[in-house]
Image (tube, rainbow, N blue to C red):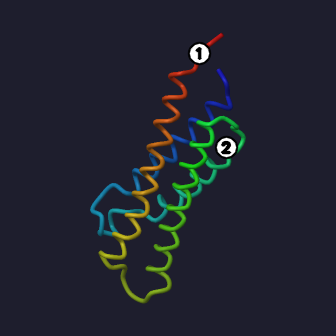
Amino acid sequence: MNLEKVVFGFFVLLAATLNFGYVTGDLGNPQHHNVLELYAAVVVNVIATILKFGDRTQIGAIHLATSLVATIQLIAAAVAWIWYTQIQVGEISTHSMASVVSLALGALLANVVSVVLMIIETANFRRH
């Protein structure tokens, strides 16, 4: 068993599941979206992105691209959450919450592509 592949797979799947957990629920209801889960998704996605930097193959480049997209969108969602809850006065509106979750949904799509790529890469692996 290759420990490097295990760690890589762990972070790719954890990034996707945290992202999924955050976006699950009513799109505009802040009570359905835990900010700590959003921040955990950002951190895990950054780690997954860093792990993808060493691969020089074409599929490695696509892995990195999907991870960068997910990370950028999750950071944008976190910044939007901070803006709507800390900079603007008052409760977060349904529209504002929907904007945050929509950004995280875009990141989820990128994470799903990354997981599918990982599965394809694993299925194509041949032992010599």
Expressed as whole percent of the image width and height from the top left, the position of residue 106 reads: 42, 57
Outermost residue on the top side: it is 128
- 116, 29: nearer the viewer: 116
Please tell me which residue is depicted at 62% across the width and 38% down the height of the picture: 60
Q: Residue at x 39, y 57 (%)?
A: 105
Residue that mark 1 sits on: 126
Q: Amino acid at mark 1?
A: Arg
| Kind of residue indicated by mark 2 | Leu
Residue 97 placement, left or right of 36: left
Tell me, for residue 50, which label it has, or none: none
Q: Please give the residue where the numbered disc 2 appears in the rendered image.
A: 51
Q: Is tag 2's residue or tag 1's residue first in the polypeptide sequence? A: 2
Above or below, 84 against 107 in this view is: below
Quick one: quadrant of the N terminus?
top right
| Residue 69 place in picture, x, y as percent | 53, 55
Left or right: residue 97 versus residue 75 is: left
